[in-house]
Structure formats: structure tokens, C-alpha cells
Image (cartoon, grey):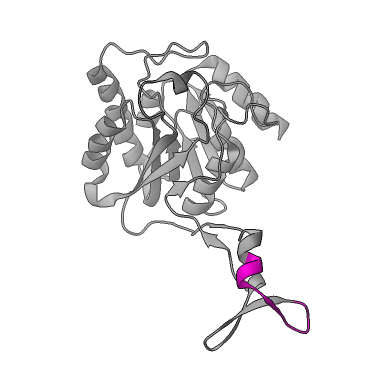
Amino acid sequence: MKLNTVHLVDNLDFLKEIDSEIIDLIYIDPPFYTGVDYQEFSDQWNSLNHYLEFMQARIREMHRVLKKNGSFYCHCDPNAVFDLKPICDSIFGRNLFKREIIWNVGSVSGFKSQVKGWVRQHDTILYYTKSEEFTFNKQYLPYKEEYIKKMFRYKDEDGRLYRKRRGGKQYLDEKPGTLVGDVWNDIYSYQTRTKSKEYLGYPTQKPEKLLKRIILASSNEGDIVADFFCGSGTTLAVAKKLKRRWIGVDNNPKAIELTKKRLNSK
């Protein structure tokens, strides 16, 4: 398998040709079963069963090529997440379903706000591992200024901020920040931030910050990160920046062309 390369091919055909247990992290942002025919690709299906059969065959192969200590992230929305989860459970094992990550996309405006009822404001990312011996690096957010002012009220002779605790002082510069949980409210989608310099106009493009969090958490430098529905190439661009090896696959010539331009400009 040639690394640091994008491949224009059906991902199932590609997956069947590569060896077992060679990839450290897989993130996919597959079709969502929306019924929408985008200009760049179609997300229309003959039936839900047709969609689920398509996904099941591919997720089974992704499980095969994932290392024992590897992780799998499947990005979904409400259209099919409750159908995809039982499939993932059956392939990975329900005990290896680690978390349902809620990504608050940050917007309740626009066309979707016309719905009768609660406006959808989040995507779901299903997180599985291949075994209990998986790679994970906890992620943190910087403390907010008001929290620092309230909690770290003292300075030592060198000007370092600290708070008093039993057994001594806790210094601000020795604390990593606020631990990131499974609800992500700090990363906005391109429904909200259409003027971002990252945004290439691809309809399902995800922010680099989202992939940065996943890649930092579930891989280390030199690991192999794969995206088998790579679209505009966000996963690959971030993996490259973070000194991971990477592999991308898509069957859409426009997506592959856009991804290559993006990667060559980094």
C-alpha cells in the first residue's frame, strides 16, 4: 500500500486489496443517507437497506485492516446513525463501542430552521476501538480567562500564577487545561463559518480543528491515518501537518482533484 497518496477508486475494491491490521486510525465521513443529490456527489439510494449493505461491507473491511490498538470514528447525522450503530456493534463488538461524540455544529439558522420541531444542531461521531489496548491521548482546552482570574489568584516571586491546595501550590503553567469530554461545543461547522480561509466550498467539508482533535487523541507521530471517504481531504491535510502517514480514497474525481491541490499547497 502506497502511503501519503490519494486514490481514485471504489473504497471497497481498495480495502480488499490491502493487508490486515496495518492502519492505526480510521476516520470516515461517509454518505449520510440524506437523499440529496449534491453537485459534487449523490447521496441518493434505492432504499435504506441498499445504503446499509453498502456501509456494512465497507466497515467490515475497515475493521479488518485496523491494527489491534487502532481506533475507528464514523461521522453520522440522524438520518441513519441509529441504523449504523447496530452494524458497527456487530462488527467491532458492542463492548468496544467507546463513545458517542456529540459535535455541536453551532448553528440553528438557515433552511433547516424551518422544520416543525426542534432544529437539529449536532452531528454524531461513533467511536470504536479494535481492542482494549488502544491508543489514546487525552485532549485539553485552555482555561477561560474568568476561570483563571477566579481560581489562580496568587503570584509567587517569579510572577507565576498559582492556587492554594492541600499539600502546597498548584501552578497554572503546570496544568494542561480543561479536559475535553464527548460533547464538543467549541468547533464550528461551515454552516456557521463560511468565510473561513480553510473552506473550499465542498458541501460536506469538515473543519480541520475537528480532525486535529481526533488525530491527536487517537494516533501518534508516524502512525498511519486513513480516510476511505476522503472528500475534500481534510483528514489527510491535518494528518500531514501532524506528522502522521496517511492514505485517502474517494471515487469522486472532483474530490480527488481538490484534495491533491490542497495537499500540494501545504
The question of residue 109 being in magenta is answered with no
Residue 258 drawn at (x, y percent): 62, 22
Q: For this rendering, which residue is in front, 166 or 220? A: 166
Q: Which residues are magenta?
A: 148-159
Quarter of the image where one finds residue 190: top right
The question of residue 151 being in magenta is answered with yes
For the image shown, how many numbered marks are present on the structure? 0
Image position of 74 with respect to 140: above or below:
above
Residue at (39, 50) in percent of width and height: 70
Image position of 39 with respect to 238: above or below:
above
- Decide if residue 3 is in sight here: no
Residue 11 lies left or right of residue 64; in this view the side is right
Residue 129 lies left or right of residue 6; in this view the side is left
Residue 253 drawn at (x, y percent): 54, 15
Q: For this rendering, which residue is in front, 108 or 231? A: 108
Residue 228 drawn at (x, y percent): 44, 30
Residue 39 lies left or right of residue 33; in this view the side is right
Q: Quadrant of the C terminus?
A: top right
Q: For this rendering, which residue is in front, 259 or 159? A: 159
- Decide if residue 71 is in sight here: yes
Image position of 43 with respect to 32: above or below:
above
Residue 88 drawn at (x, y percent): 27, 38
Residue at (31, 58) in percent of width and height: 132
Residue furthest to the right in view is: 158
Residue at (31, 54) in percent of width and height: 131
